[in-house]
Image (cartoon, grey):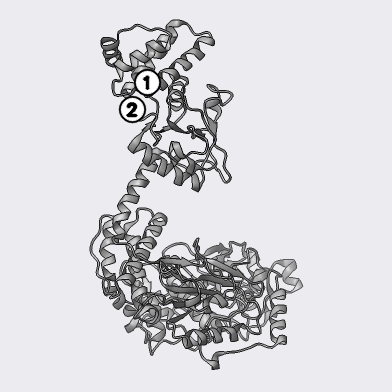
Amino acid sequence: MLEHKKIRNLGDYFVELNSRQDKGVYFYRINGYSAEIGDFLKKYYDVARRTGVVIEGKIQNPDEKKLAYYSEIMGMDFQMNIGFITMSLKKWLPRMNDYQRQYVAASIYDSLDSMQKSGKTENMLKNAYIKFMCWLYYKFERIVTQLGENNIPKMLYEGDISKYELMLISILSKAGCDVVLLQYHGDEGYLKVDANSYLSDNLQMKGMQAWPEGFCIKAIRDELQNDMNNERLYGTKPTVNNCTNAWIKGKGLDDVRESVTIRGNDSKFFYNCFCRMNGVQDKLTYTNELFLLQQEIRNSKRKLVIVNEEIAKPTPEEIAGIKRGNYTKHDQMILDLAKNLNFISNIELKRIVHKSFVDAILAEQKKEGSNLNKLTNKAIYLLCWFKRYLPDLLANWKMPDIGCFIYMGGCKNDNEAMFLSFLARLPVDVLILCPNLNKKCCLEDKLLYEVNYSESLSITKYPEESSQVKIGTVAYHAERELDTLMYQDTGMYRIQQYGKANVISLQTMYEEIKILWDQELKYRPSFSTVDGVVNIPVVFAKISGVKDGLIAPYWVYIKELITNDTIVITSAPYIKSTAPNPMKSFSAEFFKNGKLQRNKIKNHPNYPYSILREDMQDFILDKLQVLIDQKLIRGIGENGTEYTVIAQVLNLPKDIVRMIQKFDFTKKNPKLIYINTTETIISLEDSILTAFLNLIGFDVIFFVPTGYQCIEKHFNKKLMEEHQIGEYKYDLQVPDLKRLSLNNARPSWHDKIFKRGNKYGT
């Protein structure tokens, strides 16, 4: 019989018997998972499936038919000696040779002898013997006929093994079979039947963790089948492959400028670089280094593409240029879309690109799961971008040419990350520059090499022309560093520090409104800054009725709320539905498939906000999209109201636009006070205006002394906090609030004593 031996690594399982350092077999139980174990089990399962036995679940006990057949052929005699067992095997399993019978018989006898020594009766030995014989015939006949050969048969068992199962598998192991036992519930059950681990070894490896959820032999089988299906997606493989980063010295820019002729000399590889540089080493020289880098690349006649801040989304024309069909399966989609690469004339380059395309889509499939539509859209994006940049990166390519793609700013979304991972497996250096440490790149890739510096520099454009090269002085950068120290996580904020904000509507008591009204936003409850976005607490309220029925103090209260940045509307409607709006005729072309067409809006000759700072333009369009997406105005998505919303937001009154332009999200916010003393319902345009101003951070208060539902008609849900403060009053005339004296609200001592409210109630 063969002895159990220790493995040095999992690969020892696949070494032939005569080549093993210690001639013997391996029997290991595995109680945890790692990537290495996962790869091993895929290979081991494939070998066991073809040349051995795979057991999923228990080995079924012989049923009556199997026992009857055994009795008919062998009888029910039993003798506790090797000779009897050997002769029985010759009759029961005639395909076994003498060597195999000798080893199996000796192993069976050894196991039965152990049972006998432990006090088991002869009848119990007989029952175990018959069970073993039936199992050998019906389950393991394939293995016993291979025992003793140089290619050792394999057994893979999954689950919690029983005593008799372990005895039989141990019999086969000693007779010349490798065994792997997968235990998903740990070793506790096994040690009940083999307390001293005499029959097998427990695998101990670095990095072992709990089994992944759902891991089983079936999952291995499905993955192998998927691998087989994927193989046909690749077609003819390229003869050269990428050697990415293996040759670099880790110096970032120096690695990219390294001549392609001295990177490596193995003709089976092209040598490219895939690097991300976070931060800058020296603020004074960084811009100049980038300028010199692109000069050197171009002077060496290498292809170069530089992209700043964003890889522009594919245009409708680019998308239309991708031939595609209707797909029901992932592999069908990949094979069909890959035909769009047939335009590449260089056969070897075409094979390289095809392989990288398949790799990229299969990697995305693991993330997206079974969502075929999302995966198809990602594949189309990738093809559009590749066709866009191919002429400038790989035109007339031949070995060992290496193009260069530089992306300033880092990946903003999964599509960009997928595209750069795809490019990095082509004959292209991919360099990602993230000099501003406050902006993170979302790309993750096992091939990516990162260079990290502690200095941060705010730069968004790659300096391609000498006129673009700007070098800050020592004093300039010192001021920037002081600026960072003062205004980062300190509660102090520099002017216009943030360009994005979200609104939080405060629920308050009526008495709190006056307290909060003229406060800087940073002092209000729930104010915060997270990842460069300000959370702005704002007031959006309706005040119904007149407190204590006193008219004069009511107007004085409103007067006290008017600040320098307050728009006061004293009669409804503020904007009439019949008012001319030059943006109405263009609103339909500004909105397609539920999304604002931002480029069309910004490039339109009538676009009114081009004079605003860029981040504020984006902020306005962001909140316009939110207003539509959340359907805050009744009729959006139903009767075309969204086009009225777009036209109105793109045609705000000039004084409001000026307030928006100077709005600093950490200081005091602008205000809108809307007084409606009549029965007039405010117009749709007014509803759009007030809902939009709330979204961008205005405090908005409606004063409705009548208490009528005169402002809610066009809102799709309850947007405002309503305060019922007192008696309803009708037909009030709004006084000239600019001239109104605050002293008018102060009652005399006589009034206080005698509560002569008629002075204030007329």
State the mark number for residue 101: 1
Residue 77 in the figure: left or right of residue 439 = left
State the SS at label 1. helix
Q: Which mark is residue 145?
A: 2
User: Which of the pair 569/603 is nearer the observer?
Assistant: 603
Residue that protrudes farthest toward the left in the picture: 325
Residue 698 visible somewhere in the drawing? no
Which quadrant holds residue 72?
top left
Residue 251 seen:
yes
Q: Estimate how packed mark 2 is, as few (under 14), some (14 to 19) or many (20 or more) residues with alpha carbons within 10 Å.
A: some
Q: Residues within 10 Å of mark 1 (few under 14, many from 20)?
A: many
Give the quarter of the figure containing the C terminus.
bottom right
Residue drawn at the location 56% of the way across and 83% of the way down: 290
The x and y percentages for residue 758 are 63, 71
Q: Amino acid at mark 1?
A: Arg
58 lies above or below 272: above
Horizontal and vertical percent position of residue 562: 61, 79
Amino acid bearing label 2: Thr
SS at mark 2 in the image: loop
Does 243 appear above or below 75?
below
Q: In this image, 296 relative to 397: left or right?
A: right
**Relative to 301, 529 lies left or right:** right
- Which badge, 1 or 2, comes first in the chain's sequence? 1
Q: Position of residue 319 (x, y in %)?
A: 30, 73
Residue 357: x and y in percent read: 35, 65
Q: How many marks?
A: 2
Q: CA distance from mark 1 to mark 2?
A: 9 Å
Whether 605 is drawn above or below 110: the answer is: below
On screen, residue 598 above or below 117: below
